[in-house]
Image (spheres, rainbow, N blue to C red):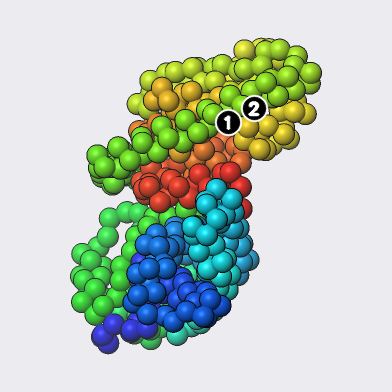
């Protein structure tokens, strides 16, 4: 068997690292160009003395801030879309301009290199845009795309093939599937051919120049298959499980395709976070909640009066929800529905275009203003800024009987916003709730500070969906 055929086919983490290095390089290049223009305008020479006396130290950190503002585009699914690239760079430039204006108006005259900051924003946006478009085009060419073979054409393999068929642009090339069922061999799944039996796996890897194997077999594997996989690994072929590839493509976990012991074997270990993350997240929660409460206090008279005029009292809405580890607490929100929205006392999920939502309530929900009283819950420690949506105990008890692993979402504090909320607005059916759970479990498994910040930015409209 030939050695690793994917010399130029970088994996996802390697591509992400290239993006970060490239963004930093072009941001610092933009900084150098900006300094040269600024110096030439004032008839100054670029020298060590120039940097020591005229350039403040914090200016050298601007490229790092730019990379932070680009955090959403380190999701390779977004980094491959031209529209997302234009949107992401435009938003980063827009936020930079806002920060620049704050610096301009709040600082003393002649105390900061205001013009060079303007140069930096312009050149950084242009260079980053060109670099990102070149990256997207380069890594969508066949020579740089990884070639994947799906092992198993059953339910799991077929699901992955269907997800791949809907993906645009394609994150990699799926050359085919292999399966031991003779009735499947020679057929197509979502337009992808079933090439042969698993016994011919090594031959298929050679002929199709495969770089990655994706195992989509839910049952026990024959010893011969395990031996074949080891030989493929020795030749440099990367081996993945179907759930891992599904997560990478969809940003959620396929709960209906997992074995019943998945929670104990895999999820719980990966869901536990270190003390530093918990401390930093709580600190961000408190600082964010204090800022949110200040805005809440300023806008309370206007919003409360508008609610009274639109639909009467009460202004606030209180309801028992389940928090971390199932502990209950009382959530506080502006009322956005009609009075007695649940006259029969039966909990009902909120649907898109729900007729119970008032005219003003619709505006408050779209702008997220209805969520601001919940900053009180964040200060108390009932909630976090980012986490799964808080649900009522009755709904949780009902859904955990219908959806596998549903109660696992209670491992973390519920949030004002979350990965599920920004990817799927309403869940009005059981199928929608399953998808939301898949997003929630993905967040719990992969959460980190960068992901939390990204979710917050997208929630408040700084990052469009």
Contact, CB < 8 Å: mark 2 with mark 1?
yes
Work out whether 304 lies above or below 105.
Answer: above
Work out whether 51 lies above or below 109.
Answer: below
The answer to whether residue 180 is left or right of residue 275 is right
- Give whichever of 118, 276 is nearer the camera: 118
Residue occupied by mark 1:
295
Question: What is the x, y in percent for residue 95?
Answer: 57, 55
Q: Does residue 284 appear anywhere in the picture?
A: yes
Work out whether 189 lies above or below 428.
Answer: below
SS type, badge 2: helix
Query: Which residue occupies 38% across, 72% down?
Result: 51
Q: Does residue 199 appear anywhere in the picture?
A: no
SS type, badge 1: helix
Q: Quadrant of residue 61?
A: bottom left
The N terminus, quarter of image:
bottom left
Q: Quadrant of residue 211?
A: bottom left
Query: Which residue occupies 48% across, 74% down?
Result: 35
Q: Quadrant of residue 45?
A: bottom left
Question: What is the x, y in percent for residue 108?
Answer: 52, 52
Query: Which residue occupies 62% across, 35% down?
Result: 368
Pointer 2 local density, CA inside 10 Å: few below 14, some 14–19, many at least 20: few
Question: What is the x, y in percent for residue 60?
Answer: 39, 65
- How many marks overall? 2
- Give whichever of 375, 221 is nearer the camera: 375
Q: What is the C-alpha distance between the residues marked 2 and 1?
A: 6 Å
The answer to whether residue 367 is left or right of residue 407 is right
Residue occupied by mark 2:
299
The circle on residue 105 is: none
Question: What is the x, y in percent for residue 383?
Answer: 43, 28
- Give whichever of 187, 380 is nearer the camera: 380
């Amino acid at each position: 068997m030939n050695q690793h055929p994917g010399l130029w086919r970088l994996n996802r983490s390697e591509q992400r690292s290239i993006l970060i290095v490239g963004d930093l390089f072009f941001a610092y290049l933009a900084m150098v160009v900006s300094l040269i223009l600024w110096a030439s305008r004032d008839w100054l020479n670029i020298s060590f003395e120039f940097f020591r006396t005229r350039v403040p130290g914090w200016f050298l950190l601007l490229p790092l801030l730019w990379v932070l503002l680009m955090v959403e585009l380190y999701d390779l699914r977004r980094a491959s879309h031209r529209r997302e690239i234009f949107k992401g760079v435009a938003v980063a430039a827009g936020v930079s301009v806002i920060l620049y204006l704050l610096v301009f108006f709040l600082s003393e005259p002649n105390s900061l290199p205001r013009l060079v900051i303007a140069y930096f924003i312009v050149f950084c946006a242009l260079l980053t845009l060109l670099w990102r478009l070149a990256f997207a085009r380069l890594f969508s060419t066949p020579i740089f795309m990884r070639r994947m073979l799906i092992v198993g054409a059953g339910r799991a393999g077929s699901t992955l093939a269907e997800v791949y068929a809907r993906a645009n642009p394609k994150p990699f090339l799926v050359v085919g599937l292999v399966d031991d069922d003779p009735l499947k061999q020679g057929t197509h799944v979502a337009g992808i051919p079933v090439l042969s039996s698993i016994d011919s796996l090594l031959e298929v890897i050679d002929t199709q120049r495969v770089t990655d194997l994706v195992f989509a077999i839910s049952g026990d594997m024959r010893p011969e298959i395990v031996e074949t996989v080891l030989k493929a690994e020795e030749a440099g072929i990367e081996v993945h499980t179907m759930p891992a590839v599904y997560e990478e493509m969809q940003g959620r976990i396929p709960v209906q395709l997992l074995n019943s012991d998945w929670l104990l074997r895999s999820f719980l270990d990966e869901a536990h976070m270190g003390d530093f993350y918990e401390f930093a997240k709580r600190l961000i929660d408190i600082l964010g909640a204090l800022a949110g409460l200040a805005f809440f206090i300023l806008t309370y008279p206007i919003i409360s009066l508008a609610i009274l005029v639109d639909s009467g009292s009460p202004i606030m809405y209180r309801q028992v929800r389940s928090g971390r580890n199932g502990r209950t607490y009382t959530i506080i929100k502006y009322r956005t529905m009609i009075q007695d929205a649940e006259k029969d006392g039966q909990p009902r999920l909120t649907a898109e275009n729900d007729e119970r939502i008032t005219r003003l309530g619709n505006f408050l929900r779209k702008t997220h203003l209805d969520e601001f009283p919940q900053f009180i819950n964040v200060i108390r420690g009932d909630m976090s800024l980012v986490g799964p949506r808080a649900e009522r105990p009755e709904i949780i008890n009902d859904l955990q009987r219908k959806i596998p692993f549903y109660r696992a979402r209670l491992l973390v504090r519920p949030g004002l916003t979350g990965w599920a909320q920004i990817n799927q607005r309403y869940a009005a059916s059981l199928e929608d709730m399953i998808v939301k759970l898949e997003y929630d479990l993905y967040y719990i498994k992969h959460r980190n500070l960068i992901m939390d910040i990204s979710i917050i930015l997208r929630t408040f409209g700084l990052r469009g969906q």
